[in-house]
Image (cartoon, coloured by chain):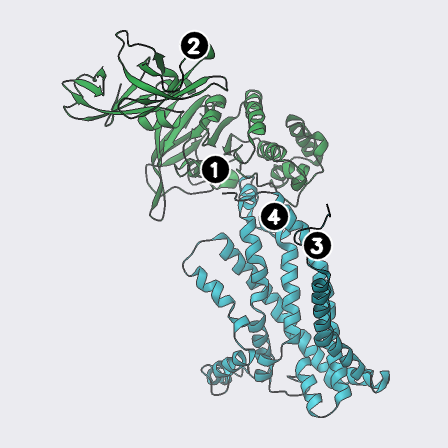
Chain colours: A cyan, B green
């Protein structure tokens, strides 16, 4: 008797499918990346560094990091609070909250940007009131931060909700009965149990915040050195036919993305035992 | 002193989980809260622990060691709670799990590092897991986790120990062993304990006294003997083991169940009232002939003789399915086989009218 397994597919199909997947990936992901870096370096290292160290580029880097630096912690906090509420409590409108949280994923970022123009713009609902007090939202840092907040809102919460729902609240109750206070329970029980998923969500959130183009483009006004983020800067350079510089800055963004991917992969390794432990410990068998 | 619960009500939305429940657990006693799922037993346990608050009422109160703790937070009640699914802290070792309750004490009452080390060591010895102190919960078996959960609850020297379905998630063999171990441990530690179970065998075997609950109310409180042999209600009788049920009615002061006629309880039964007769399988006897005993005719459907007892299934002349249990010795004296026509008599039985029983 041959040991051929029932579900084994013919070699031709196996090789065909593998080749298709690899070829697809090479054509649409590897090739553009290689082209990007090749173009970025087409005028030599000197020109590459000149483009990256240009004051406008550095300003864009600073602004991008600042916007992400504000938006990511805020959304991490929000995500944690929202996940806690959804996983731990029963309340009216819970489903609505979960659905609304996904809205930023569904709606086009450009539309989001336009909404903020309508609300905070010079002719918007709150614009005149804010202008009277000397607060500029649109075409300034607050607008960019708000737009970034909007598009990166779901990432942390979406990572945490399923995990916290699966873990349940028995451990926290156990700690409570043993006499631990609220903060102690949070830092000794809740946070360690979700730390890798939280970090994973933060990494995804950061990647999205750094690369956001649409919403930020609408609210920023593209003022060089002031409201120009890295993705916007790439577009400006490209539109001005400074291709090498555009690709150089783009390569910087891509490098950031690659770093995020590596960190994400590492976190997935870290997170795996947590899910395994969850599977080994039968929670809520009923 | 132990635990005292007075007139507790608890509802979740439309569902009322507890309706006017009062209960007393004596000092040093091991008591079982027995009932089907949804009977409110876990809710009562969580209210005693302070994990749920009873519906506000001026008469309701929870007392531990005579102290009113109704408005005292869970963390200060000093109760040990063992969760159904253990709820061990997954990011801590066995040692850290057990030490947790001591380490979170306010500085003034917190034992020294050496003292904690000693106390945890004692508890590890008690649960026979000294060698696994550095393991994580996911590296333990179900029974080991349950014992760690128990040691963790005992570490704070609780005034009372509450256990929610302590053996519910374990397989039959492990349950048996842990049950005996819990009883032995209780005899050593002597802390007032209340445990929830839906397994009547577990309650009968382990507990000093049993509280039978149904639909948010207490049906009966008593020793295992009392609740088993003198059930206060049809529910208790049915829940604590198999029963044969006969339906009949009262006629001329007698309870009539087909050819079986019994004296009705004096005075209380009214003419035509529906009556139910509940008989445990071991309280029925099989004979070849009636010989003047009260009983009824039946036909043998099946004989199960593999097991400590012989179980015979029959169909009564009135159509009811009957189940009779007897020793192998007794079976050898009056052997029966499939399709034999026999006579079934009652050694003991309980007659229930609406809200009345003898």
x then y, percent, for residue A225: 69, 86
Chain to which the residue tagged by mark 3 belongs: A
Q: CA distance from mark 2 to mark 4?
A: 60 Å
Asked if marks 3 and 2 fall on the same chain, the answer is no
Which is more foreground, mark 2 or mark 4? 2
B57 and B145: which is toward the camera: B145
Q: Is residue A211 above or below residue A76?
A: below
As drawn, the label of residue A189 is 4
Which secondary structure lies at badge 3?
helix
A167 and B66: which is toward the camera: A167
Asked if marks 1 and 2 fall on the same chain, the answer is yes
Chain to which the residue tagged by mark 2 belongs: B
First of labels 4, 3 by sequence position: 4
As drawn, the label of residue B330 is 2
Chain to which the residue tagged by mark 4 belongs: A
Which is more foreground, mark 3 or mark 1? 3
Query: Which image quarter: residue B257?
Result: top left
Chain to which the residue tagged by mark 1 belongs: B
Q: Which residue is mark 1?
A: B49
Asked if marks 4 and 1 fall on the same chain, the answer is no
């Amino acid at each position: 008797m041959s040991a051929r397994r029932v579900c084994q597919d013919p070699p031709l199909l196996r090789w065909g499918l593998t080749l298709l997947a690899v070829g697809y990936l090479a054509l649409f992901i590897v090739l553009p990346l290689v082209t990007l870096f090749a173009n970025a370096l087409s005028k030599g290292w000197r020109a590459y560094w000149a483009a990256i160290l240009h004051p406008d580029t550095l300003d864009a880097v600073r602004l991008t990091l600042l916007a992400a630096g504000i938006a990511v912690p805020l959304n991490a906090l929000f995500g944690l609070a929202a996940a806690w509420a959804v996983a731990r409590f029963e309340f009216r409108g819970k489903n609505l909250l979960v659905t609304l949280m996904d809205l930023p994923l569904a709606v086009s970022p450009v539309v989001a940007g336009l909404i903020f123009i309508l609300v905070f713009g010079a002719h918007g609902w709150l614009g005149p009131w804010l202008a009277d007090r000397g607060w500029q939202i649109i075409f300034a840092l607050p607008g960019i931060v708000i737009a970034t907040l909007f598009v990166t809102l779901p990432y942390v919460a979406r990572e945490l909700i399923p995990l916290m729902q699966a873990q349940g609240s028995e451990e926290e109750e156990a700690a409570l009965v043993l006499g631990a206070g609220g903060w102690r329970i949070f830092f000794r029980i809740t946070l360690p149990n979700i730390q890798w998923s939280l970090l994973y969500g933060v990494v995804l959130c950061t990647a999205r915040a750094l690369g956001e183009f649409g919403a930020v483009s609408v609210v920023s006004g593209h003022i060089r050195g002031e409201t120009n983020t890295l993705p916007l800067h790439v577009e400006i350079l490209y539109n001005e036919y400074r291709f090498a510089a555009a690709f150089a800055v783009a390569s910087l963004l891509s490098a950031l993305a690659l770093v995020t991917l590596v960190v994400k992969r590492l976190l997935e390794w870290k997170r795996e035992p947590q899910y395994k432990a969850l599977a080994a410990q039968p929670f809520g068998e009923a | 002193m132990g635990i005292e619960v007075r007139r507790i009500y608890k509802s979740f939305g439309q569902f009322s989980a507890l309706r006017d429940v009062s209960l007393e657990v004596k000092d040093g006693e091991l008591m079982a809260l027995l009932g089907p799922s949804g009977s409110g037993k876990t809710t009562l346990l969580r209210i005693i622990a302070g994990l749920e608050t009873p519906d506000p009422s001026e008469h309701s109160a929870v007392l531990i060691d005579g102290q009113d703790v109704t408005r005292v937070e869970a963390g200060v009640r000093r109760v040990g709670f063992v969760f159904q699914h253990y709820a061990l802290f997954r990011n801590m070792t066995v040692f850290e799990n057990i030490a947790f309750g001591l380490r979170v004490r306010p500085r003034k009452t917190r034992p020294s590092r050496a003292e904690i080390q000693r106390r945890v060591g004692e508890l590890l010895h008690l649960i026979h897991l000294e060698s696994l102190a550095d393991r994580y919960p996911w590296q333990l078996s179900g029974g080991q986790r349950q014992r760690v959960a128990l040691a963790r609850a005992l570490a704070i020297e609780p005034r009372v120990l509450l256990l929610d379905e302590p053996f519910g998630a374990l397989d039959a063999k492990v349950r048996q062993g842990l049950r005996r171990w819990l009883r032995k441990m209780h005899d050593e530690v002597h802390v007032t304990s209340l445990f929830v179970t839906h397994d009547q065998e577990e309650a009968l075997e382990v507990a000093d006294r049993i509280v039978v609950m149904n639909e948010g109310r207490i049906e009966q409180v008593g020793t295992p003997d009392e609740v088993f042999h003198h059930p206060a209600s049809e529910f208790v009788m049915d829940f604590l083991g198999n029963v044969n049920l006969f339906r009949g009615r009262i006629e001329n002061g007698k309870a009539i169940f087909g050819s079986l006629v019994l004296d009705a309880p004096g005075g209380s039964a009214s003419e035509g009232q529906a009556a139910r007769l509940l008989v445990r399988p071991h309280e029925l006897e099989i004979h070849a002939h009636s010989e003047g005993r009260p009983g009824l005719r039946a036909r043998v459907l099946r004989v199960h003789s593999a097991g400590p007892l012989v179980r015979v299934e029959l169909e009564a002349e009135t159509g009811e399915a009957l189940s009779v249990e007897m020793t192998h010795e007794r079976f050898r004296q009056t052997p029966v086989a499939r399709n034999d026509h026999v006579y079934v008599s009652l050694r003991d039985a309980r007659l229930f009218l609406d809200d009345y029983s003898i």
